Amino acid sequence: MTALEFKEKWILEEDDEWSALKIFPKNQVDNLDIDDFDKQFLYLSGLPYSCIPFISFGKFEDTKLEKLVDKYDLDDSFDELYIIGSDGSGDPICVQDKTGEVFILNHDNDFDEMFMSSSLHQMAEFIFLVREGYSAITEKYGVDAAWNEGEAMDLKNIYREKLRGIDSVAIEYGFWSLQFT
């Protein structure tokens, strides 16, 4: 899925406050040493202000692409991480310069890294599929089934396999491995 396809599908599927996308300034994104295809997800389509499962790319008021070390006054070992959002606990979601990998950093635990995705475009596809999966689950089984472990496993297994096809590492380890259980 390209950045513009993501934008078109995201907004088409939801026509409310949840469909808003946060766009990052191209001149700041161009400074990242990541794949151009992934850069486009930041400056062409943007990422959702808020989405399931409790993640946000709009928490920070301005669209400045800020280094983690500058925001939290950390040592240089965190120098290649740029904040693009946060999770429900306020932990920053960062893209790593040079690799393009995405991590969540636990601010309560010395910024321990939790793997999120191999790339920005794979993360965007995950976000879209997770929204689709939770909608399907809640439509068939109700809201509680989406959040209760072991319920609605027929649909949860279908979506886990779809996610595995996009980024097998992300669905097996880290943040996304906790979804659809």
Image (spheres, grey):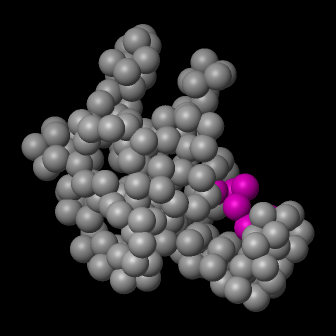
Q: Nearer the viewer, residue 121 or 108?
A: 108
Q: Position of residue 91 (x, y in %)?
A: 55, 34
The residue sitting at the bottom extreme is 140
Q: Is residue 57 left or right of residue 112?
A: left
Question: Can residue 122 be seen at all in this image of the molecule?
Answer: no
Q: Is residue 86 visible?
A: yes
| Residue 177, magenta (yes or no) | yes
In this rendering, is residue 121 above or below 84? below
Is residue 93 shown left or right of residue 172?
left
In the rendered image, the residue lying farthest to the left is 27
Where 12 sits versus 57, above or below?
below
Image: 161 above or below 104: below
Query: In the image shown, does 166 or 58 lie closer to the viewer?
Result: 58
Residue that appears at 49% across and 41% down: 86
**Residue 97 forms part of the magenta stretch:** no
Bounds of the magenta span? 176-181
Quarter location, residue 37: bottom left
* Horizontal and vertical percent position of residue 93: 47, 41
The residue sitting at 65% across, 74% down in the picture is 134
x 31%, y 72%: residue = 7
Residue 110 position (above or below residue 105): above
Q: Is residue 161 left or right of residue 125?
A: right
Quadrant that contains the N terminus? bottom left
Q: Which quarter of the figure is the C terminus placed in?
A: bottom right
Residue 3: x, y in percent?
Answer: 28, 69
> Where is residue 152 drawn, in percent x and y?
83, 79
Point out the residue furthest to the front here: 16
Residue at horizontal 54 percent and vertical 39 percent from the top: 104
How many numbered marks, from 0 up?
A: 0
Apparent side of residue 85 relative to residue 40 in the rendered image (left or right) = right
